[in-house]
Each structure stands twice: as structure tokens, then as C-alpha cells.
Image (tube, grey):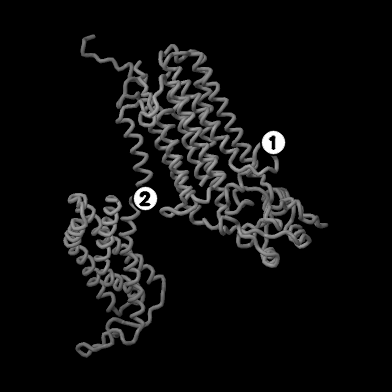
């Protein structure tokens, strides 16, 4: 062995890399960068679609107005604000874990990692609850042949649920299942009321009006009684909640983007939690103590903060703007 | 290990004693910003509903606050503040450049190039309309009626006509690109800082590139003449295809003036904004 032989052993461990960072950290930054471009692509697509249908886009405050244990209370934004705080706070515990790692304090790293994981699970649970409310819907609406959504309000402009006025008619619509009729084609769950029941109920309640998707002076346009009856002639579907085809909130793209972007972000959070758990066990097992470096914690930390960063943007563009 | 943390935020306005303290400080800052967002989002103050650059002032505030939050998450939670400047630039500039560039920056020049298409489109239709007019080209030259020579009659829109339009768009864009590249290069080289300089640079670039553009146009028009006068087999398809290109190319001569004017106007506008 001469003096000219240079040891590359540290390079295999992700040793000193370019720009004062290790290769591992650098690659994490590259990944985050490309992922950021993906998300900005999605958000830009959302923005373009929203501007295209700016006159009929659902008003976020009316859609996301639920809060746990406060049924029927109009609480716009509080819940997503809470979710934001949860995620920011789990970000803080993550930095604290990284900081403890720099000081080689194993128990502290483990403790803060644990808190981060808990925070991640709370966020995922919150998002599941948010999705549940979104999918289930609250008031229900009808869709016309032209594809626009008609909602119902009372004389003072408050939303009225279909269940409050729809008439139960002596008719029965049999659910079409895969084993009957056309070969292997079923249908999704039937809405609680048929179109005829909604229309009859509307005719019987003179103080209910139809509200269209159009926004005028920051409010959705409410039709007069005569106009309402006329619009109801075109109704073809009863829509309750939201799915990938139609939703009771308005523009079809709204639900599609909601599912896609928050779903994609939620998937990132989920992967983040899984990776955090793996690293958490590694911390407990003393892997990084032996390695004399807690850089892995720092790397997953970067990813976790990135997830937080994306949520900050999703929060702004879905709920605030 | 060197884990020297920079413990100042807000340009040194607030200094922290330890990294842990800084983390909590940033948390407080983020909490305040988010709370402001939520309060504004719920109240929607009347004063902030007005529009600024095509968007509500309130939305501008939300976006700016979001960027503020993004900055502190990246800088302090992701330790960007402690990385070497080169790593910082590599990550941040790439993201900013790509996102902004793809979405905004290139759009104006592309749109200017596409004005040529609009002009050419109009020219194609004008020529189709002229073909249907009795007075158009209705004169004799050496005993030959020009309308008969060019087989002029009413042209109905057909697939052949649209194919002609598509070919026309290609040539029109080509002209625009030839012009715009040289304009961009000239401005990059000269970097004019006043109105006069901008106009001189535009004139220089446009003067140099008018020849290649005209050449494209003239060769296209000359090459189409035999098709337009043809009478043989297949001419009933070829003639409608050639007419939009023919008309569009003639009118497209005006777009050689349009593109430099738009380009110069855009540059002057940027200059005016920069001086503000």
C-alpha cells in the first residue's frame, strides 16, 4: 500500500459530496425539486381550470365548513387551519429531532420522531374526515341535462337539504346489479330520492327556490319561483355528495381536482409517515448511534418538511383564494 | 461535526441564542402568518376585494403570505440557511426559474410570434373571399382573362382548404421565429437602456431579418403560381389547398412590421416599469 492509494470508503457511505453536502442529502434535494415541479404543475392546472370556470366555481367557504363535534354549525376554514397547524407542529418536532441528532442525543431524537409520527397520523385522519364529509355531502343537489348543478335554498337564502322537502312517492327504483340485465354492468348506489320525488317536493313547498352555480356579487344567483320551476324541467340526476363524475357543489372539475391534489398530497404524507416509522425504529435500534451520524433523520426531515411546504400551498389555493 | 446554525431571522432583526430557540421562534412566526391568513379568509375585508393586476388584492396577500411561510419552512426547517450558497442557489433558482419560466416568461414572446398566424389566417380568408368576387382579377392580359387563367371561382370551405391553412400556419410561424430569434439576440447583445436604444435595436434586427423573411414568402408565392394556374388532374384539390397559403403569405408581409413593433412595445413597457 503506497501513499498514493486514496480511500473511497467514505464515498460509499455518502461521504463528502459536492457543495458542502453529502450525496444522500443532495439526492433528497433533487427529488424534492422534481416533486415540487410536479405539484406546481398540478396547482397550475387547477388555477387554469378555475379561471376558466371562474363564474361558476364553487365557493370554498360553503363547501368546507365542517368541524368535528359541531354538526350543523357553519365553521368555514377552521378545520383546515387546524390541519395546517398540526402539520406545521409536526414539522417543528421533526426539526427538533434533527437538532437532537446533531447533538447525538438518541432518546431525544426518538421522542421527537415519535411525536412527528403521531402528528402525521393526526393529519392523515383529519384528511380522511375531510374527504368523508366531501364525499357524503350535506344538502344534495340536482343536475340538469346541460350538466349544471342546481341547489335549493329557502326564502332567506339558507341551504335546504333534499331530505327536508322531497316527497316520498309510491315508486320503487330497483338497484341495477352486475348479475341482472346487461352483462356485468352494475351501477353506483342510488340516491336517496328520485328526480320525480325532488320535483314533486319542490312543487309542494312554495317557499323553496333554486340556486344556480353562477356567482354574482360574490353570491350564487337564486332564481325566482317561476324560473326555478322552469329549470327543474331539465333535471336528469339527483346528486348527493361527490364522486369522480359529479358533485353537489358545482363544477365537476372542482371535485376531480380536490380528490387528485389533496389525494396526491395525502399519499405523500402517508409515505412520509411510513418512512418516519422506519427511521424511528432505526433510531431505537441504535443504527445511527453506531454510524455516529444522524444524517438519515435529517434526510427524512427534509422530505417531511417538503410535505408541509406543499400543504401550505394547497391550503392557500384550495381554501383561501 | 460542524453544525454552525445561523441564528438570525428577519434579516437579523431577531437573534436567537440556540437552534432550539430559533425553531420555536419560527413556529411562532408561522403560526402568526397562518392566523392572519385564516382571519382574512373568514372576514374577507371589503377594502381588500379590489383588483390589482387582474387578481383580487386579498388573493395577492394570500399568495405573498404563502411564499413567506414557504421561505421560513425551507430556510429554517429544511436548514437552507445553513447550506452553502451554491447548494441554495442550485435548488431555489432551479425551482423558481422553471416554475415561473414555464408559466409566464416565455408566454409573451410566443404570443407575439403567434400574431403572425392571426394575420396569415386573415389573409387566407381574404383571398378565399376575393376568389368569389367577380371584379377581382377580371382583366385581360395578352388576350387571356386572368380569372380564367387562375381558375377563379367561388371557393367553399373544405378539408383541402383547411389543410392549406395548416400549411400556412407553419410558414407564418417560421417567419415569426426567424424574426423573433434575431430580435432577442440583438437585445441580448446591445442591452439598450433607453427608449431610443430599444427602437434602434429593433430597427437593426428587423432590417437584417426582413430579407430572409421576404425570401421565404416570395419563394412560397412563386412556387404556388403553377399550382394556382393548373388545370390538369387533381387540380380541383390542389387549388383550394394553395389559395389560403397564397393569400396568407401576401398579407403576412404586414406581420414583418407587426412583430418588431410588438417586441419593441413590450421592451419599452418593461423599461418603463423598471424605471418606476
Mark 1 secondary-structure assignment? loop
Which residue: 68% across, 53% down? A158
Quarter where residue A56 is shown: bottom right
Which residue: 55% across, 23% down? A115
Which residue: 25% across, 88% down? B139
Q: Position of residue A261 (x, y in %)?
A: 52, 42
Residue B270 vs residue B155, the one in the foreground = B270
Residue A311, label in figure:
none
Quarter where residue B178 is shown: bottom left
Labels 1, 2: one chain: no
Residue A29 vertical placement versus A221 (above, below): above
Residue that mark 2 sits on: B104
Residue A76 vs residue B153, the one in the foreground = A76
Which chain hosts label 2? B
- Between disc 1 and disc 2, the foreground one is 1
Residue A201 vertical placement versus B121 (above, below): above
Q: Position of residue A125 (x, y in %)?
A: 61, 33
Which chain hosts label 1? A
- Quadrant location of the N terminus of chain A? top left
Residue A69, label in figure:
1
Label 2 crowd (10 A; few <14 / some 14-19 / many >=20): few
Amino acid at each position: 500500500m503506497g501513499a498514493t492509494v486514496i480511500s473511497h470508503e467514505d464515498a460509499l457511505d455518502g461521504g463528502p459530496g459536492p457543495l458542502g453536502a453529502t450525496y444522500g442529502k443532495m439526492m433528497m434535494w433533487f427529488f424534492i425539486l422534481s416533486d415540487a415541479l410536479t405539484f406546481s404543475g398540478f396547482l397550475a392546472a387547477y388555477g387554469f381550470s378555475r379561471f376558466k370556470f371562474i363564474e361558476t366555481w364553487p365557493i370554498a367557504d360553503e363547501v368546507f365548513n365542517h368541524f368535528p363535534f359541531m354538526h350543523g354549525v357553519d365553521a368555514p376554514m377552521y378545520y383546515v387551519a387546524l390541519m395546517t397547524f398540526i402539520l406545521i407542529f409536526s414539522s417543528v418536532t421533526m426539526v427538533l429531532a434533527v437538532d437532537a441528532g446533531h447533538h447525538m442525543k438518541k432518546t431525544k431524537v426518538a421522542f421527537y420522531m415519535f411525536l412527528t409520527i403521531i402528528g402525521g397520523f393526526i393529519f392523515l385522519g383529519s384528511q380522511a374526515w375531510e374527504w368523508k364529509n366531501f364525499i357524503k355531502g350535506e344538502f344534495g343537489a340536482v343536475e340538469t341535462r346541460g350538466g349544471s348543478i342546481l341547489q335549493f335554498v329557502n326564502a332567506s337564502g339558507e341551504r335546504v337539504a333534499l331530505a327536508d322537502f322531497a316527497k316520498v312517492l309510491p315508486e320503487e327504483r330497483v338497484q341495477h346489479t352486475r348479475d341482472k340485465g346487461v352483462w356485468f354492468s352494475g351501477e353506483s348506489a342510488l340516491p336517496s330520492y328520485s328526480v320525480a320525488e325532488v320535483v314533486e317536493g319542490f312543487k309542494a313547498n312554495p317557499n323553496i327556490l333554486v340556486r344556480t352555480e353562477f356567482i354574482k356579487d360574490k353570491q350564487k344567483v337564486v332564481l325566482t319561483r317561476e324560473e326555478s320551476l322552469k329549470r327543474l324541467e331539465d333535471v336528469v340526476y339527483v346528486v348527493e355528495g361527490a364522486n369522480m363524475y359529479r358533485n353537489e357543489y358545482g363544477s365537476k372539475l372542482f371535485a376531480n381536482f380536490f380528490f387528485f391534489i389533496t389525494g396526491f398530497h395525502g399519499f405523500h404524507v402517508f409515505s412520509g409517515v411510513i418512512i418516519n416509522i422506519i427511521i424511528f425504529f432505526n433510531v431505537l435500534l441504535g443504527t445511527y448511534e453506531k454510524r455516529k451520524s444522524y444524517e438519515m433523520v435529517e434526510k427524512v426531515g427534509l422530505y417531511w418538511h417538503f410535505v408541509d411546504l406543499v400543504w401550505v400551498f394547497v391550503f392557500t389555493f384550495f381554501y383561501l383564494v | 461535526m460542524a453544525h454552525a446554525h445561523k441564528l438570525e431571522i428577519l434579516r437579523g432583526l431577531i437573534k436567537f441564542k440556540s437552534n432550539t430557540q430559533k425553531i420555536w421562534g419560527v413556529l411562532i412566526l408561522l403560526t402568526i402568518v397562518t392566523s392572519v391568513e385564516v382571519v382574512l379568509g373568514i372576514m374577507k375585508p371589503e377594502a381588500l376585494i379590489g383588483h390589482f393586476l387582474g387578481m383580487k388584492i386579498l388573493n395577492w396577500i394570500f399568495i405573498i403570505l404563502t411564499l413567506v411561510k414557504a421561505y421560513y419552512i425551507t430556510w429554517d426547517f429544511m436548514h437552507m440557511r445553513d447550506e452553502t450558497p451554491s447548494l441554495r442557489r442550485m435548488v431555489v433558482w432551479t425551482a423558481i426559474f422553471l416554475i415561473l419560466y414555464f408559466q409566464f416568461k416565455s408566454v409573451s414572446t410566443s404570443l407575439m410570434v403567434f400574431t403572425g398566424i392571426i394575420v396569415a389566417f386573415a389573409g387566407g380568408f381574404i383571398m378565399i373571399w376575393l376568389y368569389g368576387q367577380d371584379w377581382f382579377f377580371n382583366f385581360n392580359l395578352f388576350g387571356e382573362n386572368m380569372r380564367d387563367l387562375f381558375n377563379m371561382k367561388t371557393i367553399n370551405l373544405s378539408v383541402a382548404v383547411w389543410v392549406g391553412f395548416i400549411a400556412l400556419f407553419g410558414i407564418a410561424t417560421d417567419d415569426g421565429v426567424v424574426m423573433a430569434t434575431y430580435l432577442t439576440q440583438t437585445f441580448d447583445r446591445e442591452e439598450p437602456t433607453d427608449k431610443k436604444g430599444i427602437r434602434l435595436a429593433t430597427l437593426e434586427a428587423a432590417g437584417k431579418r426582413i430579407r430572409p423573411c421576404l425570401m421565404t414568402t416570395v419563394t412560397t408565392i412563386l412556387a404556388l403560381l403553377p399550382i394556382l394556374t393548373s388545370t390538369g388532374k387533381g387540380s380541383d384539390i390542389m387549388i383550394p389547398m394553395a389559395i389560403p397559403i397564397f393569400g396568407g403569405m401576401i398579407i403576412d408581409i404586414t406581420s414583418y412590421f407587426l412583430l418588431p413593433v410588438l417586441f419593441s412595445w413590450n421592451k419599452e413597457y418593461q423599461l418603463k416599469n423598471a424605471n418606476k
